[in-house]
Each structure stands twice: as C-alpha cells, then as structure tokens.
Image: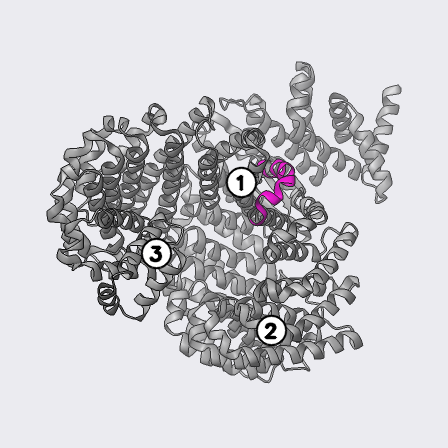
Amino acid sequence: MAEQQQQQQFYLLLGNLMSPDNNVRKQSEEAYDTIVGQTKITFLLQAIRDVSAAEEVKQMAAVLLRRLLSSSFEEIYPGLTLEMQTVIKTELLTSIQTETSPNIRKKVCDIAAELTRNLIDDDGNNQWPEVLKFLFDSVNSDSVNLRESALHIFWNFPGIFGNQQQHYMEVIKRMLVQCMQDQDNPHIRTLAARAASAFVLSNEGNTALLKHFSDLLPGILQAVNESCYQSDDSVLKSLVEIADTAPKYLRPNLEATLQLCLKLCADSNLTNMQRQLALEVIVTLSETAAAMLRKHTAIVALSVPQMLAMMVDLEDDDEWAMADELEDDDFDSNAVAGESALDRIACGLGGKIILPMIKQHIMTMLQNPDWKYRHAGLMALSAIGEGCHQQMEAILQEIVSFVLIFCSDPHPRVRYAACNAIGQMATDFAPTFQKKFHDKVISALLQTMEDQSNPRVQAHAAAALINFTEDCPKSLLIPYLDSLVQHLHVIMVAKLQELIQKGTKLVLEQVVTSIASVADTAEEKFVPYYDLFMPSLKHIVENAVQKELRLLRGKTIECISLIGLAVGKEKFMPDASAVMQLLLKTQTDFNDLEDDDPQISYMISAWARMCKILGKEFQQYLPVVMGPLMKTASIKPEVALLDTQDMESISEDDGWEFVNLGDQQSFGIKTAGLEEKATACQMLVCYAKELKEGFVEYTEQVVKLMVPLLKFYFHDGVRVAAAESMPLLLECARVRGPEYLTQMWHFMCDALIKSIGTEPDSDVLSEIMHSFAKCIELMGDGCLNNEHFEELGGILKGKLEEHFKNQELRHTKRQDEDYDEQVEESLQDEDENDVYILTKVSDILHSVFSSYKEKVLPWFEQLLQLIVQLICPSRPWADRQWGLCIFDDVVEHCSPASFKYAEVFLQPMLQSLCDTSPEVRQAAAYGVGVMAQYGGELYRPFCTEAIPLMVRVIQSADSRVKENVNATENCISAVGKVMRFRPECVNVNEILPHWLNWLPLLEDKEEAVHTFDFLCDLIESNNPIVLGPDNANLPKIFLIIADGVANESVKTEDACSKRMADVIRQVQGSGGLWTQCVSTLNETQQKAIQELLNTA
C-alpha cells in the first residue's frame, strides 16, 4: 500500500516537473534530485510500464530515465544487484514489444540504445547479448512496430555490435537493404536510410567498410527524395552529415547525389529549409572534398544560378530605409542562405572555377529593371571576393567602375548593396584597392553619405568608409583629409541635432566610428581637426546615458581614445584628465551595467589606449580599472553536454553554438561574453607590457587568472593572450626580487610545458612556444627541474616526429586520385604551418642552450638523431635551415663540448655553404662564424676549409640580389670572425683587402655590428693593410662608416659607434686629410657622419 502511495506521489512529482510555473518546477527538480538513483530507476520504469498513467507522465519518465543512464551510469548502474540489472533489461525489451503509443515506444528504444552504449566494455564486448538477438528477431518480424523499433535502436547506436561488427557485417547490410526496400511502409524505408547513414558516419574512418556499403547509397538518395515530399527532412540532414564527415562515401554516386540536391534546391514546392539543406550538401562538399567536387564542374555551374535566385528572394519593405535599429539578418531567409553558400563555395572551390561561372550572371542581374536583382548581383560580388581574390584582382578596374555607378541607383537598397560591395572589396583587396581607386571611391562614399532621407544608406556608406580608411596607407589619405573631415563634421552636427529632436542614432553611431578610423590612419596629421570634434564627442559621452544609446556611447568612447592616440600625448593632455573622469564615471556605474552591455568592451579597449597615451602616469588609475577588467576577463561561459534528443529543444539563435561529438552527443557553449573576455585578456597583456614594474601590484591576481586560461579551448584569442602574458608578467614581477619571481615562474612553468604538448591549434601553439622560450631566457640557468626537462624532452621529440609524419602524409596526398593544383596550394599552406612550429622548437632549444650551456647536452641527446635527420641533403630546405640553426646554437653556447657531435654536423654544414637555398647558406655561414668565435681549437681545420667556399659565395655574380643578400652578408661576417678570432686559419693579408671592399653590411644588422667592431680593432691597431700607404684608404673607411650609419646598421647604443666617432674625430684634427675624406661623400653620407659625431 505504502509503495502505491509513493508511486502516486512520484507521478505528481513528474507532473510538476513539467509545470509552466517556474517555482513549482524548481521545487520539483530539487525534490527529484534527492531521490536515490536505484529508487529513481524503479519508479521511472514503473511509470513507463503503467498502462493507466497519462501519456505525458510516461513520456517525462522515459526522458528522465534516458538522461539518468546517459549522465550518471557509472555512479548508479554498477551498484545495482544483478537481479535488478536483469529486470531493467527485460522490462525495456518487453515494453518495446507491448507499448501501444508510438511516441513512448520510440522513447523506450532510446533508453535501450543508451543502456547498450554503456554496456559495451573496453574490449568491445556487448554485455547485453539479448538486445542483439532482439534486433535480429524484430527486423525479421511481421510487426511493422518491431521492425521500426529495431531500426530506431540501431540508428541511435550504430556501434551496438561492438567487436562483433565485422562478424555480422553481411547481416547488417542485408537487414538495411531489406528494410530500405520495404514497399508497403514508407516510414520504414526512411528510418532504414537514416540508420544506414548513421552506420556509415560512425565508421567514417573505415575505408573498406565505406566501399562495401557504397551500394546502399542509391537507396539512401531515393529515401531523401521521397521523404522530402512527405515534409520530413531527416534523411536529407543525414546526407548533409555524410557530406561533412565521410564525403568519400559519396564518390561512387557523386553525380547522382549532386543531381538530386540540385533538383530539390530548385523545387519551389518544398520549404525554404529543405531547399537550403539540399544546397548545403553541395556547399559542404566544396569544403570537405573540394578536389572531388572540382571534377563535376558542370553541376556546380548549375548550382550557382540557384544560389543567386535565392538571393533575389527579398521582401519589399517601405520602412526599410528609415529603420534606426539594425535588426539581425533573418538567418533562415533564402537571401542570407544563398549569399552564405556563394561565399563558402567560392572559398571552397577557388576563383579559377567559380568566377567564370558567375561573372555573366552577375552582369545580367545588374542590368535588370527589378531592384531585387541589382541588389542580389551586388551582394553576390561582395560574397565571392574572398574566394575569387586572385581572379577578381585581375579585373578589379572593371568591377569597381561598374559598382560605383550603383552608388547613385534610384533604389535605396541597391545603393546600400553598392556600399556593401565597396566596403567588402576595400577589406578583401587592401591595399591595392585603396592605391588604385582612392579618388573615385572616397568621393562616391561622401556623396552617398549625404543621402539625408535614407539614414540606413547613409550609415552603410559611413561603414564602407571605415573599411576603406582602416587599410588605407596614410600618405594616400592625407590629401583628402580636409574634405573628409568637413563632410564628417557636417553630418555629425546634423545627426546630433536629429538625436536631440527625434532620438535617431543609427547614422551617428557609424559616423563617430568613421571619424575614429580617419584619425587612426592620419595620426599626427589629425591634430588641426582635434578641437573641431573633441567638444561634441565629450558632450555625447556626458549626455547619452539612456539604455538605447549604450552603443553610441561606447563607440564615442572608442573614438575619443583613438583620436587621443592619433594626436599624441602633448595635444591630448589638456583633455586627458577630463576624459579620464568621464570614463571613471562610467566605470563607477560599471557594476550596474548588464553583462551584455556593449559599452563594456569599448571601455576596456579605451582604457588600454589611455594607458598607451599616458604611459607611467596611467598607473594612478589602475585601482579603478582593474576590478571591472578582471571581472570581464574572468567570465565563465555557460556550457552543456547534450545528447541529440535534448538538442532539439535548444536552438542556435539564442546564442548557443554546438560541436557534434559523434555518438549522438553534442557540446554546447553560450558564446555571449566570449569576445569581451578575449578583449579583456588582451588588455591585461597591454598593461603589463606598457607599465612594466608599475603593474607589479596586480601580477599575482593576473597570473592566477591567466595560467588556467592556457586551457580555455572555447576561444583561441584568450589562450594567445594567456601565453603572451607570461613573460611580460615575469618582467613586471622582477622588482619584487628573485624569490617572488621564482614563485611566479613555478606557478606558470608546468602549465606552459603541458600546453605545448596539448594545444590543438598551430597558431596558438606557436605563441605558447614563443612565450615559453622568452620565459626561459628571462629566468636563466636553473629555472627547469628534472621533471620539467623530462616532460619538455618528450614533447619536443613528439613535435619533431610529428613534423616528419606530416611530411609523409602530404607526400601521400600528392599521390591521391583527386590531387590537383588547388590541393597543392593547401598542402603548401600546411607545410608552412609545420615549418613555423619547427622554428619555435628551435627558439625553445636556443633559450635552453643559452641559459644552461654545456650542462644541457646529455638531455639534448634524446633529440640528436631527429635534428641530424633534419639536415639530411634529401630534406626540404626549411628543415635543413632550422636543423643547422639548432647546431649553430650548440656550437655557440656549448663549446668546446659541442665537438663531440662534430661528426654528425660538420660535413653537412660545409656542404650547405654552397647550397642552392640562400636560407641554408645563411645558417651554415653563421655556424662557421660562431665556430671561429666560440668553438675552440678543435674546429680550426674546419674554419680553414670553409674560407674559400664562403669567398666563392660572396664573389658570385648575383650574391647581392635581394634573396641572396642575407646569406652573403653572413658569409662576409663569418670571414671577418675567422680573421679576428682564428687568424692562424687563414692568410689574413691576402683576404683583408677583399673583405674591406665587401663592407658595409646593410641588411643583417646583428652581423653588421660584428664587422664594425672588427674594423675598429684594425684601425685602432693602425693595421697597414686597412689604412693603406699614407692613410690612402681613409676616404673609403669614411664611406663605409657613413653608409653604415645612414642605413642604421649601427645604433648609437652599440659600443662600436663611439669607437667609430673617435676615429673620425682623430681625422678631423688634421685639416687636409679631413677635407679629402669628406669631399668624397654625398649629402646623406655627410649628414650621417655629422649625426654620429653629435650622438656618440
């Protein structure tokens, strides 16, 4: 009796869990959470099996039981008695056979699938063999319901056969084929097609299996076609997933797949969503299997007009041009979908294929009397700019002059689209676009901005102007500055009036940003206009306090800080404290700002600019600024792990984004606040960099925030900022003494090393490695313990092994049947990425060698064979270059002990002096120089052998052309170092006159200093060869020094610049010689000599 009562109470609880009243629901959730797992299972099962219970109660119970097994299986199930476990299994299978409601039956199938998913052990054994027998029996049953249930379970968990899958392969295939041919039951055919797709997707890496199942694809395609006309797009969605994850599966029937998608996309009887999904298959393939799709260009060419037709699907809206709030684009609309598809397919397949297909269509559209076609044509031009970059660049003149005509089109939305195209091209083709078309474009945009009766067009013209000025070279913008400023000022004043009278703000928001962008590019040339704008801008910040003006106020704060940065401290100083007070006022109200307030990120960036302007004087404001900044940098995003069933209830438009983890699970993250978090982290980096020891008070809290963010995988920018902050924070912390510094380093060191091992993104990885290397240089000898070294060694070894493996993979891809020149382009990009990581491995080794010297060699030996492999003659030049650089470091920092590796690198280094690649020659020449300088006695024969080889490089005809000059200058410097440090290895008297003729070095500033040092040694010791008989060479020496100074090859702080100045002063004392020396110099050279005398 009591049990019955409990069960009734439980039903009541289930009912309340669905209550529309939040409080009731919350209380019920809390009550539900207190029930023990085993009891929950008993009650939920009873509810599901209870014939008398209401349908929605049973449904709720089924959902909860599935969630329980999905989220808490390990905590609950293994603790149940064997008997209880058997009861659950039996009850579920019985329920599927007896349940009359299709909806509940489906949900029970989901529970069975979830249970099986958890009952496959680590070796792949299915611990519930009865469920497999149930599947086979049901699929062959006469009952449609059972056949449907079996397919549903298999669709939900295609891995159900575990390690028996290979054994049952034929059975699985037969089962699917048989159900896909069920003539009497269309929904069985649909479900079988979805199950077949799910099986293919869960075996995406198994090429043999995909091939074996390729004859199921025609059946899947047929089901796609049928189900779409039954207004069910589930199979079509499965096809999109296959195109995304297992595109090669479609190859044998690619033509048929594309034909079907094209037909569906063109059929206006279907819903927009279905047509867009059909197009999505083609577009996805252009991204996941571009080379395969490029063999079917005829069909691609037919899909382009489909996308354009979607883009014409616009509503007439008389209010459009006057709208003051920019509502987000309607993402489900055909126009947006068509535009996005065009952008992606152009990027996927490349302009060589897409531009010829689309160009004529666009030209025709632009001549259509209906505005919608002209609008779509211009938007299409904007969309393909990125993908068709190279091909459009060739005909840019023709495109631009055509687009500019539409800035004065009779229809406002066409004028808007013209501005959009200009803005997009200004970004895609910068700075060529600015250099070629500045006069026409600026005047067209300024004219369009005067369109008072269409604020929306005005605002978009202002936005295009921002894109234009952001990437415009300063020298091009200066001539237009007057006219730009006058226009912007007139519009700003007019719109301020409008804001006061009507409350409209859209154009003002854009114009304020246009002013900021012009100031940002014009820099100090903006000074004369400062007083024209600053009072109005301050006025906006003071008075625009209403909620609907938040964005305007944020953009104005940005504008003020950018103008301040442009005109510099001196001009801005009188306003600085007033501006700071205004910002501080916002700051004190900061705690009242809502989390999504747009002002926050503008404020945070403005603070950092103020810090750059004010320098050390900014320190006084840190106590006010740091609170909100740390709060924003500490934002924790909302995340959720959902299974496919739950996914249906959450949509992407409330700010959630999902990553499919496979196996019916998705990871969701709410993206609000992520950008702000990244900006805030970037600003903390900026403070540490600008204020150095002035930031020391905050180093502890910042380092505690940043270290865990090295693992913040939701946003690359956050991880980059975390990595960048590490060496900067150590620099800030230095003033607190070695103990504090070491504590801080210990706090970050482990995490940095680990993240080098785990970081998935190569751009972020290179930042982390770079920062780690800087930290080691900063901390020096003793900063890594044995565990650190062991872990670091393993990780670097892994990176090098991965480097070789990736090269092999690319070699394999070059043999692939779909290999073409576009594939080659992307392989070369991968290659560059790889080499970039190799340079960072070299950076880390450099910092370790320079800090630890020869003590670190025993540790280095685990990497030795891999580095030797890099310098094999058969490797690509970049490998050889960086391999030699690492050995250069070994010689420079670990000699004379380095000689024990001489047998593995000396011969390759000698041969590399004459390599065809200048980068390899440069690394080898640098190596000879450090051998002479640091290597010790044992390297002498090698220095002798290297000299004639380097002389040959220096004297070859094209040794000074741009690509060769750095290698040549390294050779010149190395010859100098051998004469200076190992004169016994070379006939100095013979080489020295040549060496003088090769000076000065103009490209490699570091090596230039070495040569000038040596030159000063020679002059100060009155070397007869250098000075010549009766000092006849002095004019020539003057020339070398003058060119070196004029070229900034020597800096005032270099010790040798004082020595050179002394040489010149000595000559100054002897009148005739001085006149003779100076008379051979041109004006620039004379000025350089004068400058040297004044500063050194």
Q: Amino acid at mark 2?
A: Ala
Helix, strand or loop under label 2: helix
Residue under label 2: 462
- Closer-to-camera residue (1055/624): 1055
Residue under label 3: 822
Q: Which residue does the image show at 13% across and 41% down from the upper left?
A: 986
In the depicted structure, whether residue 177 falls above or below residue 1003: above
Residue 1004: x and y in percent read: 31, 52
- The C terminus appears in which quarter of the rendering? bottom left
* Highlighted magenta segment, given as a residue range: 690-707
Helix, strand or loop under label 3: helix
Q: Amino acid at mark 3?
A: Gln
- Its colouring scheme is one colour
* Label 3 to label 2: alpha-carbon separation: 37 Å
Whether 782 is among the magenta residues is no
Is 693 situated left or right of 545 in this image? left
Is 387 situated left or right of 527 in this image? left
Helix, strand or loop under label 1: helix
- Closer-to-camera residue (1008/180): 1008
> Earlier along the polypeptide chain: callout 3 or callout 1?
1
**Is any part of residue 318 visible from this angle?**
no
Q: Nearer the viewer, mark 3 or mark 1?
A: 1
Residue 1011: x and y in percent read: 26, 49
- The N terminus appears in which quarter of the rendering? top right
* Label 2 to label 1: alpha-carbon separation: 42 Å
Residue under label 1: 731
* Label 3 to label 1: alpha-carbon separation: 46 Å
- Closer-to-camera residue (880/1063): 1063
- Closer-to-camera residue (731/41): 731
Q: Mark 2 touching mark 1, by CB under 8 A? A: no
Residue 26: x and y in percent read: 82, 37
Image-quadrant location for residue 834: top left
